[in-house]
Amino acid sequence: MKVVVLAKYVPEPTATWAFEADHTLARESVEGRLSELDEYAVEQAVRLKEAGAADEVVVLTVGPAKAVDALRKALAMGADRAVHVSDEAIAGSDALGTSRVLAAAADKEGFDLVLTGMASTDAEMSVMPSMVAARLGLPQATFAGALSVEGGTATISRDLDTATTEVTVTLPAVISLTDQTDEARYPAFKAIMMAKKKPVETRSLADLGIAAGDVGLEAAGTSVLSIAPAPQRQAGTIITDEGDAATQLADFLAARGFLR
Amino acid sequence: MSEVLVLVETSGSTVRIPSLELLTLARRLGEPSAVLFGSPEDSVVAALAEHGATTLYAVPAPEMEEFLSLPKAEAVTDLARRLSPTAVFITSSPEGKDIAARVAVALDSGIITDAVDVTSEDGDVVATQSIVAGRFVATTRVVRSPAVLTFRPNSVEPSPAPSSATLETVDLSVSEVARGARVVATTPKESTGRPDLTDAAVVVAGGRGVGSAEGFAKVESLADALGAAVGASRTATDVGWAPHESQIGQTGKTIAPALYVAAGISGAIQHRAGMQSSKTIVAVNKDPKAPIFGIADFGVVGDLHTVLPALTEEIVRRRT
Amino acid sequence: MNTLRLVVGLLMTVVMLGLAGRRLLYLYRVGGAGQPVEPGRLGAVGTAIRAELVEVVAQRKLLRWTAPGLAHAAVFWGFCVLLLTVLEAFGSLFDPTFSLPVIGQFPVLGFVEDLFALLCILAVVAFVVIRVREAPRDQGRRSRFFGSHLGPAWFVLFMIFNVVWTLLLTRGAQINAQEVNTTDNLPFLRGAFLSQAIASLLAPLGQDVNEVIETVALLVGLGVLLGFTVFVTYSKHLHILLSLPNVALARRPSALGALLPVSSGGREVDFEDPGEEDLLGVGNVEEFTWKGLLDFGTCTECGRCQSQCPAWNTGKPLSPKLLIMGLRDHALAKAPYLLAAEQERDGLSDDARAVASVPLVGDTGYAGDPLAAYAPLGPGGVIDPDVLWSCTTCGACVEQCPVDIEHVDHIVDMRRYQVLMEGAFPDEAGAMLNNLEHAADPWGRGASQRLAWAEPLDFEVRVLGADGGDRIPDDVEWLFWVGCAGALDDQAQRTTRAVATLLHEAGVEFMVLGEAESCTGDPARRMGNEFLFQMLARQNVQTLDDAGATKIVVTCAHCFNTIANEYPQVGGSYEVVHHSMLLGRLLAEKRLVPVSRVDRDVTYHDPCYLGRHNRIFAPPRELLGAVPGLRLAEMPRAKERAFCCGAGGARMFMDETLGTRINENRAAEAIATGAQTIAAACPFCITMLSDGVSTLRPDDAPVEVTDIAEVLLRAVRPDLDDVSPPPQAARP
Ligand SMILES: Cc1cc2nc3c(=O)[nH]c(=O)nc-3n(C[C@H](O)[C@H](O)[C@H](O)COP(=O)(O)OP(=O)(O)OC[C@H]3O[C@@H](n4cnc5c(N)ncnc54)[C@H](O)[C@@H]3O)c2cc1C
Ligand SMILES: Cc1cc2nc3c(=O)[nH]c(=O)nc-3n(C[C@H](O)[C@H](O)[C@H](O)COP(=O)(O)OP(=O)(O)OC[C@H]3O[C@@H](n4cnc5c(N)ncnc54)[C@H](O)[C@@H]3O)c2cc1C
Ligand code: SF4
Ligand code: SF4
């Protein structure tokens, strides 16, 4: 079985983020990393390999030149190969465009199972797994809290508000994994050194047979008008209890919708 | 007037509140039509009409629940193809995102997730999103319609706008692909027990200020009134007032509930490491200098032994 | 008879010394299986000689424990002196009237020899008393001999006793033989008081009998001594021979303070471009340097280290003694394999090959029995991971060890292998490493939070780069290194504000790096993640050098140790002082004047990385002493013997689930002094102790834990009772 893991290169969450004039995230000037939530997907893929269920784990990213750092991290965690789709024309793509590129790249690579994170830690849309599955004509199962694969079927569990469900998915399929799955490993230095020797292939849109006009800022179905820093978080209201604190607190909770 | 398809969710005989919020928002762009899975009870139809839905598309396919969101996405896609609405509104939830994603791909529509506000500008849908963990606000125009939008719950106060709704039943055949992800077992969560700490929407936690194991009962009562999970600082678990599994922090659990209530917890950095991404933080502490107030949205300087029981009582009173 | 005695004596000597020599040669070859030592270890002859004089001849560390120290010194000096009698004994094999040249017949020599013989006997008695009183059978884990080889230790005492009494008997008989013969068998007419006393007891037996006694006792004595020598080469008493080279080759002034960089094959490893074959840390016993193996062979099993170890004293399986013994036993068990040529290894016994494949660190399944956490013959591992990860690197073991064994270095070397090669370490620490890597602080707060501490201050703190310049201006004297805790932990922020306020008060121009500061890398390094340490350290040195920093003041003991002692390893050399030292100077210069009494009982906790690791014992105490009204009470375990708070060695970021909590142990000791204030001088100690105090006193905490600077601030600026309003910190 061949597993393709979709792994995104995102700005460091603790860094100070900035946006370019075209409202896209300034990815070159901010320290980046492999999205923390995608580490869970890499971890599950590597575990499938260690358990003998998978033969090969390939990580795939669509992103700028520096995104190769995210791939190296995934390789250090135990992935076998990496594919980096990088093309000037992709810059500024919306979810439609990005999913088009990811689907084409995964298709070209070939796979039995695509694993993804539950959300990126930058745009946090949580739509890519379903979009990629839709484009590939495959079923998807999202927000899996646990994963096992046997034969041509994957079994996942989903933790919902009122119930836990178990879902079987016929492969090939796309599965997204939550942070409830096993903690991602911290790669040993030896593994980091070994990862430097693992192959990373770079692909352009042309390699994937996608016309430059089908992706990128211009082709997007949405257009960002403005991005502004959120108004400073209101400093909290601090009251001193003079007998009516409970009422005031209840009012506050009601106003925030917690007493419905 | 243009049509807005609104995917509504019900629980038994009531419409879930986020769905009423969607209807309220949809009225800004046009006439809301509700899409709903299953056969609606009268009270549901009435509530939807009360909030402005003019048409109600009911998709009764009983085997729907057997599969994950794919059949629902197919149904919404079919409807959207047929009706060419201005926009499709869905609540931000795991299932909502799945459906939105598939609909957007199928229709090649612009998609915006986690919107908190929406308007119409020159006939285009423009949505406001809170992005990057709330650090920025983005406004985005959808240039390829129908606009597929998912909204965060609590984005707007639901308001009524009575209309009369016609009910239309829609047939659905579940495709082969959609049958690929099948629910094989469902274990309902114990409704009597409290939710699990790590994924609870509301957490009430107690610290050393609670004073004793008996005192901790006040924390638990408040938690039950709020339907919350119970958490604790390390000190409170160390002295045995709360079980070790309920420890929150650097060496305990890391949580991010919608509401976190800290009672008698000073808010040491080791504790904050486990709860600082909570959306709303409430603190009750008798020391006005306690660091927890630095990150609290609402703080009460006072004795938790009086404040917590009074609050519990107040909540119970308001809920009945 | 004289020929017989000559033949028997010489034969015995040749056989026994042959046996001992063969064993020593073998051990030498085993040692040779180790790695070359790191650069700079050899060659400082002067310090080596000085060390021999202080540590071996003057028995410095041993004498810190008065009773056992004196007893050991008596035996040590006794055996040195009695070496002369051994020469005399050998001489008398050839010539019954032999005496040493020149000094041989001085009465004072006879007196000294007899005196030390007597002292040896008294010492043996003292040792017996100590061993009975501290018997592990009664005392269990509390005994420092718990887990030591007790049989051989008793045997050695018995042999010392035998050596001395046969000697005295020989000498007594010699005197009698002399009297009758009028020859000069014992070289001394006067002085040898004990021998004379024994002689008068033996005299009635007559000359012939005494001659026989002399010969028999001489031969028995020599036999015992030679047998002892052979035994020594096979037992823990090897230290008699090995402590000399071990002390000579030890790190000076001590194996505390800085950790050594990772080296492989005697060269430092370049982490930016490591060699293919480089060993990163120690994963097999032969990957220790030969000096490391020498350490293991030298351990006397005295248990001084164990008695002081915070991990051991709180019920964890780690004992530095058992660790060293386990590694020694494993090295010896693996020796046949190590010494066999590659092609011969398959021919070795199954046992020998099995031992060779035992991992150094692995699950022993010890289930609470600390002795079972060390399994030199495997199969799971030589030491349990719980042993390895329990160490706080407090250095109490190194401080105590009379033969200068370097426990902390060995522990960290094994951690290095686990982390760098295997990626194996306690899960909780992973979050800390990730945070260091991604946010440059252990809590993952990020650079943007690093100046939040200064917001409540009513004066401006100068931040590098704020005015556009990227170098520290000339009018700034000190760079204030705030540290991660100092910048991000609420309680430590108070210390930071107190120090800043005091410096401001004294008119000292200082500056902080603000967002440009990163973790020094201490927790990463002590966990064994040298790679991450090197990254952080190089980045910080770059920042400091770019800013032109020369004088740095820090409030954190770990930052102090790292910047002062370890940054020179990566090319950064600065004058680094702890705030206790700088504030002390300002007090001495009257730039800070305590104006108000602070009427409190205080005790002071020595942070390991300030005290033991850096010998800064006095400045914090002097600072407290300068505060009027303060009454300082010392804890029983203070200064060199201070008990750790439990935070070092990255333990701060791991769960403490084994045994009892180290911080509670220390907090209880501090509370027991009756102090109202527990003062420390390191943010990690303060967190640990205040946590301990709140658990011990859950209902009310009349005992506060605070930094010495805050105490001083109360005396200097009594109006500022509050340097700690709640920070309105931005939430991510
Ligand atoms: C702040 C912000 C807001 C945005 N809002 C919108 C919007 O409203 N509408 C819109 O159409 N576009 C939006 N975008 C653009 C969007 O980021 C990209 O289209 C993105 O590639 C897809 O969304 P996501 O990152 O949220 O992925 P998610 O759907 O959250 O990602 C889920 C998983 O998909 C995989 N994945 C996602 N992206 C990649 C990638 N590039 N390479 C490899 N694997 C990947 C990962 O496994 C990830 O865990 C926004 C971008 C930003 C920075
Ligand atoms: C290595 C390490 C790891 C740690 N990991 C964690 C962790 O994972 N999680 C964690 O929580 N802690 C952790 N800690 C402990 C942490 O440092 C704090 O000591 C702990 O969080 C304090 O708990 P607390 O807030 O309950 O107690 P305190 O700090 O003592 O605070 C008690 C608070 O209660 C208030 N109070 C008292 N009486 C009343 C009353 N009647 N009404 C209202 N308020 C009252 C007081 O004003 C005070 O603010 C760790 C510590 C260490 C050293
Ligand atoms: S450094 Fe401290 S904790 Fe570690 S073994 Fe030595 S005495 Fe024990
Ligand atoms: S390591 Fe040193 S202190 Fe510890 S038992 Fe051995 S000789 Fe004694």
Image (tube, rainbow, N blue to C red):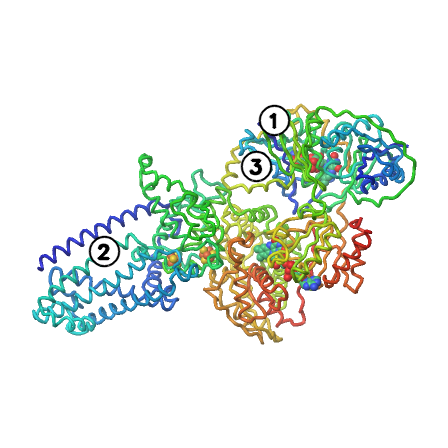
Res C330 label = none
Q: Position of residue C18 (x, y in %)?
A: 21, 50
Decide which of tag 3 and tag 1 comes sooner along the chain: 3
How busy is the neighbourhood of tag 3: few (under 14 within 10 Å), some, or many (20 plus)?
A: many
Relative side of C521 to B77, left or right: left
Residue B27 picture location, percent across and down: 88, 38
Q: Please indicate whether residue C351 sits to the left or right of residue C444 in the image.
A: left
- The residue that label 1 is drawn on is A152
* SS at badge 2: helix
Number of the front mark, 2 or 3: 2
Tell me if label 2 and label 3 are in contact, CB under 8 Å. Answer: no
> Helix, strand or loop at disc 1?
loop
Q: Residues within 10 Å of mark 2 (few under 14, many from 20)?
A: some
Q: Amino acid at mark 1?
A: Gly
Residue A21 placement, left or right of A29 = right
Q: CA distance from mark 2 to mark 1?
A: 73 Å
| Residue type, numbered disc 3 | Arg
Q: Which residue is mark 2?
A: C227
Query: Residue most toward the right?
Result: B163
Pointer 1 local density, CA inside 10 Å: few below 14, some 14–19, many at least 20: few
Circle 3 sits on which residue? A72
Q: For the point 24% across and 65% down, which residue is it?
A: C81
The residue type indicated by label 2 comes to Gly
